[in-house]
Image (tube, rainbow, N blue to C red):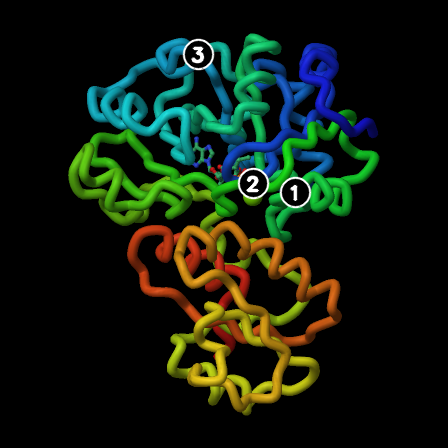
Amino acid sequence: MKRGTDIAAAADVLRAGGLVAFPTETVYGLGADASRDDAAAKIFAVKGRPRAHPLIVHIAGEIGDWAREVPDAARRLVAAAWPGPLTVILKRGPQVALATTGGADTVGLRMPAHPMALALLRAFGGGVAAPSANRFGHVSPTTADHVVADLGDDVDYVLDGGKCDVGVESTIVDLSRGQPVLLRPGGMPREAIEAIIGPLAAPDAAAPAAPGTLASHYAPRAEVIAVDPDDVPAAVRAASGKVAVLAPRSAFGPWGPWGELSVLAYPLPDDLAGMARELYSALRDLDTAGVDVVIAALPPAVGLGEAVGDRLRRAAGPRKP
Ligand code: TXA
Ligand code: MG
């Protein structure tokens, strides 16, 4: 494994069918040539991800080169949102390898906003299939150190672009079947999308299954218990082992509601963007600190709070009966 900032070297690795971890504004991706079955297959092997779970294709060029049909709503949405933390699901164009989409006839497309990601895509000249650069089911990486800790020598090149700005994955909208459906809340708030294309429906039974929507995902080693802020004290009293509370900084102050609780406090920024940016490194830090139970306060489900709440609930896994 090599680590650095050499875009040309990273693009060469992609051309040779190898794996490049690269920064995006959301989380680090584990990239390979999206048009090659053999390259995409390496991603599934390294991640330990089931082969039927489709990968997002990152592009820097024309959306029409990668999808068979681009409905008007998709055009308007990407014109406003790209480059940025939004993935649209459309009908798969012929240059996308079937292994990349897990055999599906649709493809997830996204133009990332990180300058290093865009530079890599331009230098490579094609689409880059990339899931988050972590082992399947684990917490997504938001620094190059996280990637190295998770994947080490299984990656050919790690492009180091510092810490990710957004901190949670892209919002995924399915536009391949008429009515736009929100498959995964993420870095672009629902409200911003609905202002452009109107109401987003919830996934129905016919919606494509997505691993990021499995009940248990984005999970650290510690047990995570996600509760409304009012229920934090009771959850702390009921927990045993080394317990930590993950909540906005203002909740812990001397006048905060839990000032008197004797637990490890992990303060997050009070604003939702800051919370999203720090969430995954907080979960990794708490694992490193040997915490057994993380009691996490759920933010209000508005703006980026919808994605933060979603990730906390999935980190918590299916509710125990
Ligand atoms: O922000 C992000 O989206 C990051 C960065 C690296 O771009 N990527 C990411 O990828 O989160 P991953 O593989 O961890 O999650 C991709 C999600 C999965 O839930 C997958 O099922 C869904 O996108 N997806 C991709 N293609 C799809 C398709 N054709 N139909 C339905 N879901 C799709
Ligand atoms: Mg992921």
Rounded to the nearest angstrom, the CA distance separating label 3 from label 1 is: 26 Å
**Considering the numbered disc 2 on the image, is that residue within a helix, a strand or a loop?**
loop
Say if mark 2 contacts mark 1, CB within 8 Å.
yes
The residue identified by callout 2 is 164
**Which is nearer the eye, 282 or 197?**
282
The residue identified by callout 3 is 61
* Crowd band around label 1 with a 10 angstrom C-alpha radius: few (<14), some (14–19), many (20+): many
Judge whether residue 211 can be spotted in this image.
no
**Considering the numbered disc 1 on the image, is that residue within a helix, a strand or a loop?**
loop
The residue identified by callout 1 is 143
Rounded to the nearest angstrom, the CA distance separating label 2 from label 1 is: 7 Å
Q: Which one is earlier in the sequence, the residue at label 2 or at label 1?
A: 1
Instruction: Give the quadrant of the N terminus.
Output: top right
Query: What residue appears at the point 19 percent right and 33 percent down from the top-left corner?
Result: 197
What's the amino acid at mark 3? Gly
What's the amino acid at mark 2? Cys
Residue 316 in percent (x, y) is at: 53, 67
Query: What residue appears at the point 42 percent right and 57 percent down from the top-left corner?
Result: 310
**Considering the numbered disc 3 on the image, is that residue within a helix, a strand or a loop?**
loop
Query: What residue appears at the point 40 percent right and 77 percent down from the top-left corner?
Result: 229
